[in-house]
Amino acid sequence: TKGKKWFDLPATDLSDDKKKSFEILQMRKALDPKRFYKSNDLTDFPKYSQFGTIVEGAADFYSARIPKKQRKQTLVDELLADAEFRTYNKKKFEEIQSSKRRG
C-alpha cells in the first residue's frame, strides 16, 4: 500500500482494460485538439492508482444526465461510441495518409 497518508491506497493490478485507459489518458492531447492539457510527464504506468465512476447528484436535471443506454464501461468504449470523435479521427487519418502518399 501507499501508506496511511494516502489512505492505504493499494498497488494497481494492470489488466488490459486499465492499460488501454492509461494509454488514452496519456494521448488525450491528440484526441481533442481544441482543449489544452498540461504536458504528460508519465513514461510508464503508475504503481498506485484508482479509477472511479462519476455519479450524478439528485439535484441534476434529467436533461443533464447521461442515460443508462448511453453509458459505457470503459473510456475506450465511450470514445468509440462518440460520433464526433470518430469523424475527427477519420479526417485526421485521411490527411496523414494523403500527405504520406505525396511525399
Image (cartoon, grey):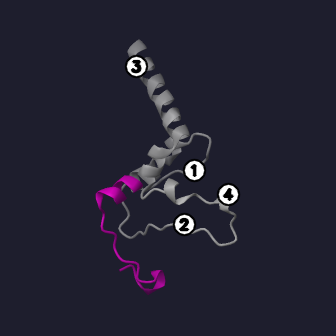
Q: Position of residue 69 (x, y in %)?
A: 50, 55
Q: Is residue 78 left or right of residue 34?
A: left
- Mark 3 Cα-neighbour bin, 10 Å: few <14, some 14–19, many ≥20: few
Report the residue marked by disc 1: 37
For image coordinates 47% across by 30% down, the residue present is 90
User: Which part of the image, by quadrant, shows the C terminus?
Assistant: top left
* Frontmost residue, 12 versus 84: 84
Q: Earlier in the sequence, mark 2 or mark 1?
A: 1
Q: Amino acid at mark 1?
A: Tyr
Q: Nearer the viewer, mark 4 or mark 2?
A: 4
Assess whether mark 2 and mark 4 are in contact (beta carbons under 8 angstroms).
no
- Say if mark 3 contacts mark 2, CB within 8 Å: no
Closest to the camera, between mark 4 and mark 1, is 4
Q: Which circle, 2 or 1, is nearer the viewer?
A: 2
Quadrant including the N terminus: bottom left
Q: Residue furthest bottom?
A: 4
Callout 2 secondary element: loop
**Residue type of the residue flagged with mark 3:** Lys
Does label 3 or label 2 sit earlier along the sequence? 2
Residue bounds of the magenta highlight: 1-21
SS at circle 4: helix
Badge 4 is on which residue?
63
- Label 3 sits on a secondary structure element that is helix
The label shown at residue 78 is: none
Which residue position is annotated with label 2?
54
Image depth: mark 4 or mark 3 in front = 4
